[in-house]
Amino acid sequence: MSDKQVELPVLDISKDDFSLKVQGFFQKFGRQFIIGITVVVVVVGGFYAYKEFIVKPKEQKAAELMYKAQQYFSQDSSKKVLDGDESSKGVLYILSNYSGTKSANLAKYYAGVSYLKLGQFDKAIDYLKDFKTDAKQVQMVAYGCLADALAETGKKEDAVDYYQKAGTTFEKDESISAEYLFRAGLLSETIGKAEKALAFYKDIKEKYPKTEKGSQIDKYINRLNVVKPDL
C-alpha cells in the first residue's frame, strides 16, 4: 500500500465571493426570510399586546364585578349572587361577558352552589361539572356540592363517585373529608351497595378517627358486619 499522501485542494473563498454568495441567498430566499421574521415579530408583539391591552383589563374588570357577588355569597343571598342587584352585576353576567377569565371560572362555582341552594339541581350540576381549580379545598367542596345535586336528581351512583372524590381531594381537612366519605357510605347503602359502604366506613375509621364522623363510625361498621345485603 502506498504511503503517498493525497493533497486536498484548498478552497480559496475571498470576501467578494462570500458577499456574492450572501447576495445570492437573499436574492433567492430574501423575501421568504423577511416574511418569516416579520411573522414572528407580529405574532410575539401581537400576543404581548393582546395580554396587556385585552386580557389584563378584562381580568381586572371581571374581578371587580366578582367582589360584590362574593359578598352576597358569604351572606347566603343566592339570587343576588346569580343576578346581582340594582347597583351590581351577578355571576351570570360575568359568565356571559367575561368568559375565559379566572373570575368567570370562579363564577361557575358560585353559580353552581347558588342553584343548589335554590333547589335548581340540573343547573347546579351543569355549572359545578364545568368548574375546575387548583385550590384543592375549594375543589373538594365543589365535588361535594355536585354530589349533593346528583343525589337530588336520582343519579345516586354518580353522586357516590363524586362524594368519594370530595372525600379524597384535600385530606388535610379531616372533618370535611370524613363527612363526604360518610355520605358516600350512606348513599351506597341506600342503593344496596353494602360492601362498598363498609369500605367507606372503614376508611373513615382508619384515617379520621378523631373527627365527629370517626367517633360514631363503629356502629355503622358493626351494623354492616351483621347485615350484608349485597354479599
Image (cartoon, rainbow, N blue to C red):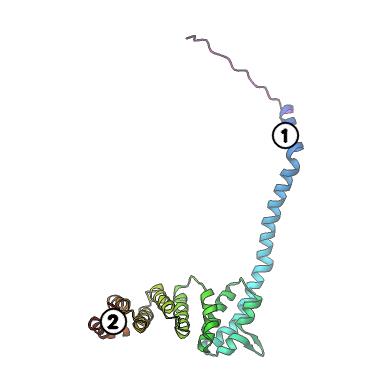
> Residue at position x 51%, y 86% from top?
116
Separation of marks 2 and 1 at Cα, in angstroms? 85 Å
Q: Is residue 197 above or below residue 16?
A: below
**Residue 4 forms part of the magenta stretch:** yes
> Residue at position x 40%, y 78% from top?
160
**Position of 49 compared to 182: left or right?**
right
Q: Is residue 43 above or below residue 142?
A: above
Q: What crowding class fits label 2: few (fewer than 14 Cα within 10 Å), some (14-19), or many (20 or more)?
A: few
What percent of the width, then of the height, locates residue 33? 71, 43
- Residue 49 image-quadrant placement: bottom right
- Residue 219 image-quadrant placement: bottom left
Query: What span is in magenta?
Result: 1-15
What percent of the width, then of the height, locates residue 56? 64, 69
Closer-to-camera residue (190/160): 190
> Residue at position x 60%, y 77% from top?
63
Three-letter amino acid code at disc 2?
Answer: Pro
Three-letter amino acid code at disc 1?
Answer: Val
Considering the image in quadrants, where does the C terminus appear? bottom left
- Confirm or deny contact between disc 2 and disc 1 (CB under 8 A): no
Disc number for residue 229: 2
What percent of the width, then of the height, locates residue 1? 47, 9
Q: Main secondary structure of the magenta part?
A: loop
N-terminal of the two: label 2 or label 1? 1
> Residue at position x 26%, y 82% from top?
224
The residue indicated by pointer 1 is 22
**Residue 18 forms part of the magenta stretch:** no
Closer-to-camera residue (209/152): 152
Q: Is residue 62 above or below residue 17?
A: below
**Position of 171 compared to 21: left or right?**
left
